[in-house]
Amino acid sequence: MKADENWKSVNSSRPVSISSEPENRWIDLVSVPLMMAYVTRYIYGTDKLRPNAFEVRGLNGTTTGIIHCDDLAILSQWLKYITDNVVGLTSLQMKLFNRNFPVGERIEYMGWVNEGVINNHISWQSYKPRFLVLKGTEVMLFDSPPLNVTGLTKANVAYKVYQTMFRVVKESETVDSRQHCFLLQSSGHEPRYLSVETRQELLRIENSWNAAIVTSVIKLGRKTFAVSHHGKTGGLTLDWQAGFSLTEGADAAIIWQYKFSQLRGSSDDGKSKLKLHFQDHETRTIETKELECHVLQSLLFCMHAFLTAKVASVDPTFLSSIQQA
């Protein structure tokens, strides 16, 4: 049987019908996998937003190119649909990875961020995509996403969460036109200036960071720093259960001890000297303890992690969600 291109055979045993319109078929010009993909409105490597346009970059290096929309409403719809799919697929991959790890070593967050990089040859900051992972006691940055469990051990940058500060950058403090920025600063390293595409993503990272802090501090349990107290060598211990304690001598005798809840403030000279202000439970008076520590920044960051974890764990539902994740 012969028919022109407008004829369609439904079944060889049934009558043949003719369509007045040609058949429409979608042809893929490019296909970008959304698993661990990256959606951006920014001109690549800059802080400049494209007007009513976006780009999707895939894990395999493919890109949609620049997609322009008629108006902001349509742009917002496309961004939401694509981002929701990316987050869902990446979360699924995270759960698959976590089957290989005990509770204290599981991944809390995976996703793309952009890191501001100062180039010595130019006077402004450029941006480089980085894949951020919060896993167990570590925060890691990758140039490309880890494809398997082994890949998680090959981070370009890795810091201990309990010795790293996370801080959301206020709009008045941003260095350029990039929005939704935050800082990561680990003891002994230069701060890293990072940004994400949306406020929602920034909140996801912040919540995941708080969860990672609790997990890492509980797993660590306690941390002791060598200090000097009134000219004597000692050890200042941060203990998840007991709080602060100072020990001296070969027998590590406890000189003083306070709960985390007794700390009323602290001050330091930015070099080595630290003052801790505790409130006595019975007299309600403030007692100040002066210490010297050669790794002061590391001590301060770790102390901040323990205090943050204690505050977060006051909420029973929050702590139980961490333990059951």
Image: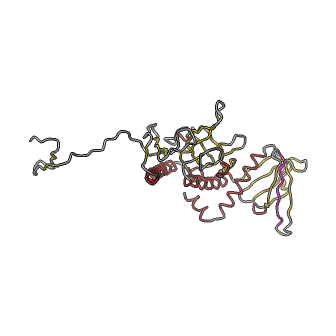
Identity of the residue drawn at 86% across and 66% down: 285
Residue farthest right in this picture: 231
* Magenta-span inclusion, residue 275: yes
Tell me residue 130's x, y (percent): 56, 41
Q: Position of residue 310 (x, y in %)?
A: 69, 60
Q: Quadrant of residue 189?
A: top right
Relative vertical location of residue 163 with respect to residue 128 in this rendering, above or below: below
Q: Looking at the image, what colour scheme do you see?
A: secondary structure
Would residue 315 be found to the left or right of residue 256 on screen? left
Tell me the quarter of the image containing the C terminus.
bottom right
Please state, as top left, top right, bottom left or bottom right, where the N terminus lies in the image: top left
Q: What residue is drawn where x is 58% and y is 58%?
A: 322
Residue 198 or residue 308, whichever sits in front: 198
Question: What type of secondary structure mainly makes up the magenta span?
Answer: strand
**Above or below: residue 63 compared with residue 52:** above
261 magenta-colored: no
Q: Provide residue 11's location: percent of width, then percent of height.
A: 14, 49
Tell me if residue 241 comes above or below residue 97 in the rendering: below
Left or right: residue 66 versus residue 248 is: left
Please state if 18 lies on the left or on the right of 309 as rendered. left
Q: Picture quarter containing residue 272? A: top right
Image position, residue 143 (x, y; %): 55, 38
Q: Is residue 311 left or right of residue 254?
A: left
Magenta range is 272-280
Residue at screen point 64% across, 37% down: 124
Disc tally is 0
Most extreme residue toward the bottom is 282
